Image (cartoon, grey):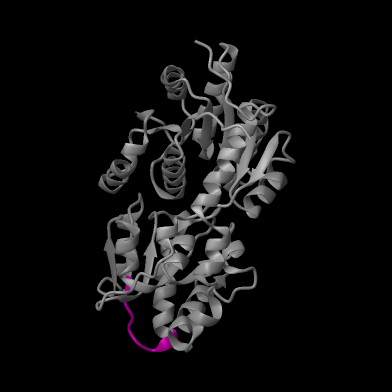
Amino acid sequence: MEEQPPLRILHCFRSPVGGIFRHVRDLVEEHSKAGHEIGILCDSSTGGEHEDRLFDDIRPFLSLGLTRVPIRRSISPSDIATMWDTYKKIKSLRPDVLHGHGAKGGVLARLAGSALRVNRYRVARLYTAHGGSLHYSRSSLGGQFVLRMERLQEYFTDALVFICEYERDTYTRKVGRPRTKTRLIYNGIGEREFEPIYTRSDAVHFIYVGMLRDLKGPDLFIDAFAKTERLLGRPLSALMIGDGPDRDRYREMMVERGLGKRIGMLPAMRIHEAFAMAQNLVVPSRAEAMPYIVLEGLGAGKTIIASRVGGIPEVLGKDSAALVEPGNSDDLARVMAETLSTPGWHAKTMPSPEAVQAVFSSSVMARDVLKLYYELVNPAAGQAIPIAS
């Protein structure tokens, strides 16, 4: 088969934090190393020092550069000006592929890509929801609007990428059966991340790592921690690692319950540093798509206790004893107590790193995404179509 020419690929998303940012960073690195030209367009008002360090890590792979513009979480009149500014910046980069991630990133990529087509540019328009708008309920007016917008945008979409079966099934149930090309491509982590990370001598019993907002369940973690202490009849220790809008409220919650000295709080840090602080990782989310923290924890040999939400059962196993009912701190405390009191619980419950690596590898993810790009750019010849000047 004739060698495929390199592509110019631009990833669009709103907030450079969490799983979406991690997903894009992996694709950027893998595809850049394969000889493609990559760029990122994202919000300029979110992220902090930790995210700046992560951008520094991938900057050498961004031959199309890092473009940051103000992108609000909610819909507002300022979106019109943002769209026009974004369109001009995207046009100047001359991409072959526009890949939108998350609701706002999906809007920007697909509308800008469609505008480019009107102006005789040939560009592939892809969208990966990463949960996002699929967390909305069809029973609310706001949810109906968002989900109908998702349906409408299918007319401007060349392919939908689903990162787990749960996301694909949820899209079909809430939005409708897709009327454009779809592909299921699991999130994956790199080969170097499938190495044990051993705990420090001053390790705590449990850690929570992630955004400090109710959707991710930090309040459930605090509540379950207190109940775990009562179940075991002894004091325990924990850390909450991350940043977010509700940080002060969670701190007050701990102080009110007398847990301020037994649950510490640390800002977001590199994941290998966080994993060294405990063996047991708690993921108490109320909703998820396919969280990287679960894959990273398993690759590092950690014990995972997680809510039965999103694609997590596809990783841990649908009948795993590590899964708890979402929003139920009693059930979460029960499993947290079992991990500390049951000999061999980790070995009996966790999938092996080898089994996880066979399915959830970033190299496989990047290969399958790139294959889809080529199918869309020129399905007949499998070659990139030159962009009009």
Count of numbered labels shown in the rendering: 0
Q: Give the image location of residue 153, x and y in percent.
A: 63, 29
Q: Give the image location of residue 274, x and y in percent.
A: 32, 64
* Residue lying farthest to the front in this orientation: 1
| Pick the front one: 204 or 188 | 188
Residue plotted at (73% across, 40% down): 176
Q: Which residues are magenta?
A: 231-238
Magenta segment, principal secondary structure? loop
The quarter in which the N terminus is drawn is top right
Q: Is residue 66 left or right of residue 310?
A: left
Residue plotted at (31% across, 69% down): 276
Q: In this orientation, does residue 252 appear? A: no
Residue plotted at (35% across, 87% down): 234
Q: In the figure, 271 relative to 88: above or below?
A: below
| Pick the front one: 100 or 256 | 100
Q: Is residue 122 left or right of residue 207?
A: right
Q: Quadrant of residue 42?
A: top left
Residue plotted at (53% across, 37% down): 103
Q: In this orientation, does residue 227 appear? A: yes
Q: In the figure, 375 relative to 211: above or below?
A: above
